[in-house]
Amino acid sequence: MTDPTPDPDSVARHLQATRDDEAHDKDEGDARGPADTSRPGELTLNRVLDRCATLGPNLRAVIWVQGCPLRCRGCVAPETLPFTGGEVHTVAEVADWLTSLTDVEGVTLSGGEPFSQAQPLADLLDAVRERRPDFSAMAYSGFRHEALRRGTPGQRALLDRLDLLVDGPYVAARHGDLLWRGSSNQRVVVLTERYPHVTSLTDTGAGIEVSVGDDGQFSWAGVPAIPGFRTFVEEQLAAAGYVVDAREAAAATHTQREIRGTDERITEVQHRDDQCGPTAAGSPAPGPAGG
């Protein structure tokens, strides 16, 4: 995708509109932000990915945190919702992993609900930027930007460190083929001048990336362009004899002893004319964007 030349006036208007927007919509997760369940210096993660081109601008690492207080119907990552499970890592460990990924320009935080672990994620971005000052950050949240601005000190700190935010709960009835988003109520909120071109990009989905890790575990990353994508994939894999139980995939994650993502990308899977057809070996551990 070629980035068009940004219009400075358009960018300025967009940023001002974002700052001035104080709409209060309880039905869209805007009443208040999530409770902060974080522990100082620690992060509870569901999984990580070394390189991804479908969840934010350019090539990025992705972190899926464990735990979300929302239960959006049709959530494509239900294994990330419980606050039990996942794997605990120190902020220092995750910072070392991120700074070792020299071919990515930033990280996308998903889940789960990143703002339930806001302070250690803010500390993580600070630690990474001490060594890589230009490292960018994007996050997903099921809560609206306005609610997060009224959140805890840790939530405001994380918000202050982000370049981009995709906000709002996933609403299945409003599902669409949208850039980095699952439903039309969700917004891409530009928070800094880092990615001014985002406001001018064509609002079409970035696709799905399929990966197989060193342990043979199948995973995918991205925002599906059609509802029911995960169910379709799991049914097709099950029919082919592959294990599709997310609980088994989560149990396998707990045995890891170091931060390690999946970087052996196999192919891009995207629907065309409402048909999807991934074929991959191993057991699936789906990891799309949080909602």
Image: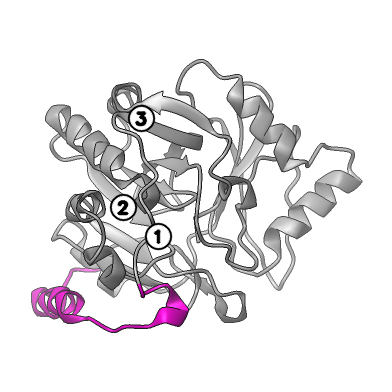
- Badge 2 crowding class, 10 Å Cα cut-off, few under 14, some 14 to 19, many 20 or more, is many
Q: Residue at x 52, y 62 (%)?
A: 70
* Cα–Cα gap, marks 3 and 1: 20 Å
The mark nearer the N terminus, 2 or 3, is 3
Choose mark 3 or mark 1, whichever is in front: 3
Whether 107 is among the magenta residues is: no
- Badge 1 crowding class, 10 Å Cα cut-off, few under 14, some 14 to 19, many 20 or more, is many
Q: Which residue is mark 1?
A: 141
Q: Is residue 185 visible?
A: no
- Mark 1 lies on a secondary structure that is loop
Q: Is residue 173 visible?
A: yes
Which residues are drawn in magenta? 4-31
* Cα–Cα gap, marks 2 and 1: 10 Å
Amino acid on which the number 3 mark rests in the picture: Glu
Mark sitting on residue 42: 3
Q: Residue at x 47, y 71 (%)?
A: 204
Q: Which residue is mark 2?
A: 138
Q: Residue at x 27, y 59 (%)?
A: 164
Amino acid on which the number 1 mark rests in the picture: Ser
- Measuring from the top left, give residue 24's x and y in whole percent: 32, 83
The residue nearer to you, when weighing 151 against 261, is 151
Q: Is residue 20 above or below residue 138?
A: below
Figure label count: 3
Task: Give the side of residue 262 with respect to residue 134, left or right.
Answer: right
